[in-house]
Amino acid sequence: MAEETQEPQAQPTSVSEWKGRSSGTAINLPSGNTAMCKRVKPEAFLQSGMIPDPLSGMISKAINEKTGLPPSKMQEMGEDPKMLASTLLMMDRVLSFCVVKPSVIMPPPCSVCNRYFTGEGGETHTNATNPEYHAYQEGERREDVLYTDEVDIQDKIFIFNWALGGTSDLMSFRDELQGTVDAVSQQQGLRVPSKSDASPG
């Protein structure tokens, strides 16, 4: 009687394989730094709360087309002060989500209301007639942590557009989006003031 051939015992799928994790892609950034980044899955963008309401339609379209945001839309986001605040907050969230190495996290929000200076903070920190108005007081920072507002604005825009399916070529980025980078750079303090700017008490 012929011996039965035994199938090799199957090994359970590892957690990293099950979740589809990867070490990311090495991306050369405009600042000269290099980061390991992962693209954002469409469902993560649309369901995670990363996209503020004013930008949901525009970003959803960019995600579905997998081409990144066209320069005209990036320019539009950079020139509208209200939209810019939401844009900067979203870019920080995307940066924190996409960059695998080094780890980048959101800065501490206001220690009073746990919200940021503008964007989701509304007029809480900017309008003295608002019933909930109070001076913005940033939470404590750690010296050994890289926060999203410490990353160069050009790197933020580059990673954000790459995550939406845009270019990873630095030359193309500079040619297509330099106007947007300039517009956002001039107003990048809208979302969260630096610690030295936060009012004491």
Image (spheres, rainbow, N blue to C red):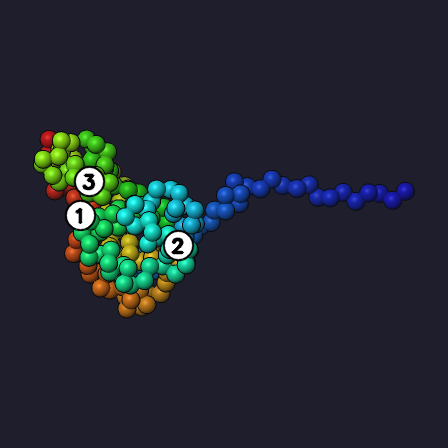
Q: CA distance from mark 3 to mark 1?
A: 12 Å
Residue at left offset 22%, top offset 56%: 78
What residue does disc 3 label? 122
Label 1 close to label 2 by CB (< 8 Å): no
Q: Secondary structure at mark 3?
A: loop
Circle 1 Cα neighbour tier, 10 Å, few/some/many (<14 / 14–19 / ≥20): some
Amino acid carrying mark 2 in the image: Ile
Pick the quarter of the image with the C terminus: top left
The tag on residue 63 is 2
Q: CA distance from mark 3 to mark 2?
A: 27 Å
Amino acid carrying mark 1 in the image: Leu
Q: Nearer the viewer, residue 15 or 33?
A: 15
Residue 123: give x, y in percent of width and height. 16, 39
Q: CA distance from mark 1 to mark 2?
A: 26 Å
Answer with mark 3 or mark 1, whichever residue precedes in sequence: 3
Circle 2 Cα neighbour tier, 10 Å, few/some/many (<14 / 14–19 / ≥20): many
Residue at left offset 20%, top offset 61%: 182
